[in-house]
Amino acid sequence: MLVATPASAATATAAFSKTSTWDTGYQGQYKVTNTGSSTLSGWTVEFDLPSGTTVGSYWDALLTTGPGNHYTFKNREYNGSLAPGASTTFGWVSTGTGTPTGCKLNGGSCEGGTGGPDTTPPSVPGSVTVGSPTNSTLTVTWSASTDNSGSVAGYEVSRDGGSPVPVTGTSYTATGLQEGTAYSFKVRAKDAAGNTSAYSASASGTTTTGTPTPSPGAVRTAPYVDMGSWPTPSLPTMASASGLKSFTMAFITASGCKAMWFNAYDPRAGWAKDQVDAIRAAGGDVKVSFGGASGIELAQACSTVDATAAEYNAVVKAYGLKYIDLDIEGSAAAEPASIARRSAALAKVQQANPGLRISFTLPVLPEGLTSDGLNVVKSARDAGVTVDVVNIMAMDYYRSVDYGDAAVQAANSTFGQLKGLYPGKSDAQVWAMVGVTPMLGQNDDGRIYDQADARQLVAFAKGKHVGLLAFWEETRDRNACNGALYMCTNIPQAPYEFSKIFAGYSG
């Protein structure tokens, strides 16, 4: 078992902060810092929460609970060793607004006895600009502040001198504004100890007037197609028979540090591009998905950010893509190094391809994204990636539950998690980030997702205006057979019956 070295050699602190808040909860984190002169070889942070406040999803730590409302977080295998001056963070999503009390770090005070609390505020945010106007929104951006602790916990944005809104990241979209109206914004930074900087100079912008510009995002229903099936699926034929216009092509994996279609065809050569062109000519589009349950995702195979970005970018250029999807599951969802590398690479690709929409497809439970999945989104957000959709794999729960109800519950739970990660977005904007992908018919765990469940999901999506509906997988719906699960749904159905239900959703 990992233990701390003696206090005389390794002294540490654990500082709590709320990185985002909302009416019924918050996202909290502790920053553990080695303030001693030798390596800290393990840490345990424990605290109590008041009645009515509980820990939900968490990341970058191992959690045990009890007695009562006592929580004990221990380091993971990758963040327990801290060199002198080094720090790490772990966090969670809280239900309820109460804050931790009685914090102990390795059995002692979380303050570490190192000379009093931090009272130094961060620097003032710079380069504040207001742009991207619509009839009812303006987007504020700024350059990051610095802090003596090594990182800034978050920012607060004030509109026209009003109450500040907490924001994580360096941008904020103000919604619900009046058209043709000027607004003024100023920003301040906040550190983990609660110190706030002075406000920045004000920056102004004006909303537009006239008919709102339609959203450029046209792909709202795009089921997965296993392009590695044999014979190779024909997307135009599927579109004609199913009533669907758009599809998600799966999967590009890594052959060494090189992008390949299911380890067989080089996308640089434009494999299946004739099909992509035909789909676009008929008014649809494609998303290309990287990763999947089998094979190696590029960020795992490539050793540098630049090499990873180059492979993603080559695929984007080869097909003129407006949409890419990252299907991150298994070990890829739990590797801090490849997650960080992927996030930084995607930020570069998005900068090189303005307007490129990036979605993440992640495992989910009815209670929401797993802690690993939530960390994938958080990493991308913090790296500056504009995440279009967080697409949940509403399948294979290995529970005796109604899979139609569970898909809706998972969507609602994920909405709450994303609301915590993106507190500056309106409810409508957060729902537009939610995607839902069930598995048709018999799931791998033997449970059934049937046509009534599909109609339930489409009705729910219409009410919430979710960002994406998809399903696994189009050839199974086409075949409408009984047999191996990779090709059949194993329930009574007509060919393309599910597709025709999902085709009724347009956003």
Image (cartoon, grey):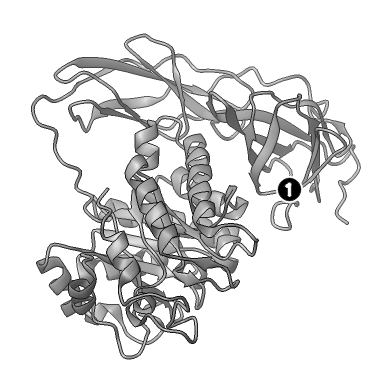
- Provide residue 31's location: percent of width, then percent of height: 67, 36
- The one of 170 and 206 positioned closer to us in this rendering: 206
Instruction: Locate the N terminus by quadrant.
Output: bottom right
> Which residue is drawn at the image coordinates 30% and 67% (left, top)?
499
- Provide residue 112's location: percent of width, then percent of height: 81, 29
Report if residue 114 is visible in the image: yes
Q: 453 left or right of 234?
A: right
| Residue bearing mark 1 | 82
Report if residue 37 is visible in the image: no
> Which residue is drawn at the image coordinates 28% and 83% (left, top)?
233
- Assign a secondary structure to mark 1: loop
- Provide residue 456's location: percent of width, then percent of height: 41, 52
Occupied quadrant, residue 281: bottom left
Q: 22 left or right of 75?
A: left
Occupied quadrant, residue 271: bottom left
**Depicted 374 relative to depicted 181: above or below:** below
- Provide residue 239's location: percent of width, then percent of height: 21, 72
